[in-house]
Amino acid sequence: MSLQPILRRSLAVPVANGTKSFVLPCKKIVFEYCETWGSNRGMREFLANGPIVSFAQRYPGVEMVVQRVDNRHPHLRAVYVNGRDKVICVRSLPPPSIGAKLQLLLDSSGSKITTLKRPKVESSNESVRGIWSAFHDEANQTTLRRKA
């Protein structure tokens, strides 16, 4: 009997939504702010007065990171499970509006915005005729030859 090490990665359970569990699509929120710029006043009040603590207690599965960035406008950056991220500039917004933007990021799925008017046609098979091009059209080629 040979002994093989058990890797930590092999013990991990893949995260997925199912009938008995729900995984929030947002896994990380980054608060970027500057100490000196006036446009960051609302973000500094939001971080100092404690609404961020109530959001962190309400969403324990989301990592909240406060990052100080010099000479920039404040941003909320959300990182999602599908690998995408969304950034919202909260320049000169009061703390309640920043809380609304944070809730918007937490409720978002992280997927791209798609139009619902016309559904996008996707096929797993290639086109039978191929891709049409004006340069490969026989009728067009004969008219081009006659003009020359």
Image (tube, helix red, strand yellow):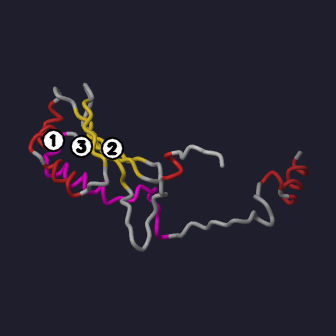
Q: Nearer the viewer, residue 148 or 25?
A: 25
Residue beneath disc 2: 77
Task: Give the mark nearer the N terminus: 1 vs 3.
Answer: 1
* Amino acid at circle 3: Val
Label 3 – label 2 distance at C-alpha? 10 Å
Q: Position of residue 66 (x, y in %)?
A: 25, 38
Task: Give the mark nearer the N terminus: 1 vs 2.
Answer: 1
Bounds of the magenta segment: 92-117
Task: Give the mark nearer the N terminus: 3 vs 2.
Answer: 2
Q: Nearest to the eye among marks 3 and 2: give it.
A: 2
Label 1 – label 3 distance at C-alpha? 13 Å
* Amino acid at circle 2: Arg
Horizontally, is 84 left or right of 89 in the view? right
Compared to residue 114, the image places residue 119 above or below, namely below
Whether the residues at callouts 3 and 2 have beta carbons within 8 Å, the answer is: no
The quarter of the displayed image where residue 131 is located? bottom right
Q: Position of residue 49 (x, y in %)?
A: 9, 44
The quarter of the displayed image where residue 71 is located? top left
Label 3 residue SS: loop
Residue beneath disc 3: 90
The quarter of the displayed image where residue 19 is located? bottom left
For mark 2, does the 10 Å Cα neighbourhood hold few (<14), some (14 to 19), or many (20 or more) residues?
A: some
Whether the residues at callouts 1 and 2 have beta carbons within 8 Å, the answer is: no
Residue beneath disc 1: 47
Residue at the front extreme of this rendering: 1
Label 2 residue SS: strand
For mark 3, does the 10 Å Cα neighbourhood hold few (<14), some (14 to 19), or many (20 or more) residues?
A: many
